[in-house]
């Protein structure tokens, strides 16, 4: 079994989203970390900077803010994600592909999170256990894809998984106890999944999803770095 990540600082990126807010609250209730910081697009009441996944300068500014804190980052969770908006919905066929939709999906699901890794992973301590987790999705698994469709979302999450894998390898060269993983949180009752929650899926409240995610992270060992796991801690095929 793994061991709890405690002490230092826990940071949630995307802290105003359904899962992100539940994770932030759960970590504060646990009280295992000296400080829990939730970051989102808007600046916080306590001076926390806002960040925009499509603006690397804002990500770098957030990293600079975190590096100025006295506590080391022991846990960082990227709880951001994009599936649909007022303009675009998941494609049912290749004929529905739209270049702007694809650009949006990759910008928010792959490029932005990769830039978070670029600026946050170097802040993890050289000694002791630390965890960076990015919320991915089972539909980003190439091996698990038996239905097709949802092309932009699937492909952008598959790209995210590759970034996580490569980042884990690079991070592990200098931070032997650091763990960098992709997580499938399951279908959660949030705005992201709301249009699809009546399709027979097992939809869970954000608070339950947050507890599951934190339990999975507690159970990971250094040898699990670079992996892709579901909300029960089971590996998901690439």
Image (spheres, rainbow, N blue to C red):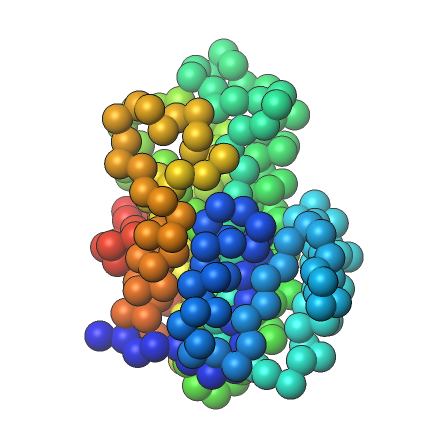
**Coordinates of residue 117 in the picture (x, y in percent):** 57, 61
- Residue 56: % across, % down: 73, 54
Residue 233: x %, y % from top left: 26, 58
Q: Residue at x 77, y 57 (%)?
A: 57
Quarter where residue 39 is shown: bottom right
Residue 210 against residue 67 in the figure, above or below: above
Is 48 placed left or right of 17 in the picture? right
Image quadrant containing the N terminus: bottom left
Tell me what residue is drawn at x 30 percent, y 64 percent.
215
Q: Is residue 166 above or below residue 140?
A: below
How many numbered callouts? Answer: 0
| Residue at the extreme top | 95
Report the front residue among 124 and 198. 198
Residue drawn where x is 40% and y is 22% of the image: 149
In the rendered image of this protein, does residue 187 appear above or below residue 48? above
Residue 235 on image: x %, y %:
26, 54
Residue at the image point whose x is 38% and y is 41% from the top? 188
Query: Is residue 5 something that shows in the picture?
Result: yes
Residue 227 seen in render? no
Q: Is residue 100 above or below residue 20?
A: above
Residue 105 position by quadrant: top right
């Amino acid at each position: 079994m793994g061991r709890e990540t405690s002490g230092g600082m826990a940071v949630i990126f995307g802290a105003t989203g359904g899962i992100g807010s539940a994770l932030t609250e759960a970590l504060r209730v646990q009280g295992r970390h000296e400080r829990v910081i939730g970051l989102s697009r808007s600046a916080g009441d306590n001076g926390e900077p806002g960040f925009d996944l499509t603006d690397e300068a804002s990500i770098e500014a957030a990293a600079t803010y975190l590096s100025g804190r006295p506590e080391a980052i022991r846990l960082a969770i990227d709880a951001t994600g994009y599936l649909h908006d007022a303009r675009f919905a998941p494609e049912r066929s290749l004929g529905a592909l739209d270049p702007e939709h694809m650009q949006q999906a990759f910008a928010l699901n792959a490029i932005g999170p990769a830039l978070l890794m670029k600026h946050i992973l170097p802040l993890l301590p050289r000694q002791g256990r630390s965890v960076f987790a990015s919320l991915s999705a089972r539909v980003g698994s190439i091996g698990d894809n038996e239905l097709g469709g949802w092309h932009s979302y699937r492909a952008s999450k598959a790209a995210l998984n590759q970034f996580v894998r490569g980042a884990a390898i690079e991070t592990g060269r200098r931070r032997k106890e650091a763990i960098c993983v992709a997580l499938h949180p399951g279908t959660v009752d949030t705005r992201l999944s709301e249009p699809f929650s009546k399709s027979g899926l097992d939809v869970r409240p954000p608070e339950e999803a947050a507890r599951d995610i934190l339990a999975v992270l507690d159970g990971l060992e250094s040898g699990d770095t670079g992996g892709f796991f579901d909300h029960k801690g089971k590996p998901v095929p690439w």
